[in-house]
Amino acid sequence: MASGTTVEAGPVGDFVRPDGTEVALVRSSDPALPAPTLEELVMGYLAASRPSRAERLRAA
């Protein structure tokens, strides 16, 4: 990223979980952190589609 470039915090990707709740991947406003890679976006999407441990325990 070019020096002096400002990065605004905000959603990078929105995903809907199987139960209908929405999950957002949010970019940090810290300019020292790199923008998310395509791999990170895909991993966020895949993680959003999996039920959380708490959801699995509630279902049991």
Image (cartoon, rainbow, N blue to C red):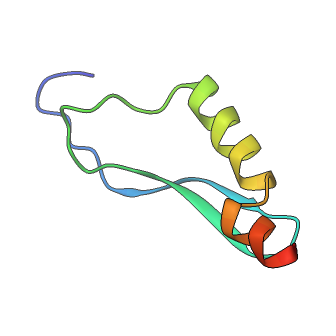
Q: Residue at x 62, y 36 (%)?
A: 41
Q: Quadrant of the C terminus?
A: bottom right
Q: Residue at x 69, y 60 (%)?
A: 53
Q: Is residue 13 above or below residue 23?
A: above
Q: Quadrant of the N terminus?
A: top left
Q: Residue at x 80, y 64 (%)?
A: 17
Residue 22: give x, y in percent of width and height: 70, 71
Count of labels shown? 0
Quarter of the image where one finds residue 32: top left
Q: Is residue 21 above or below residue 40?
A: below
Residue 26: give x, y in percent of width and height: 46, 54
Residue 51: give x, y in percent of width and height: 78, 60
Residue 2: give x, y in percent of width and height: 21, 21
46 vs 10, left or right, is: right
4 vs 7, left or right, is: left
Q: Is residue 46 above or below residue 22?
A: above
Identity of the residue furthest to the front in this view: 60
58 vs 6, left or right, is: right
Nearest the viewer among 17 and 52 is 52
Quarter of the image where one finds residue 44: top right
Q: Residue at x 53, y 25 (%)?
A: 37
Q: Is residue 22 above or below residue 46?
A: below
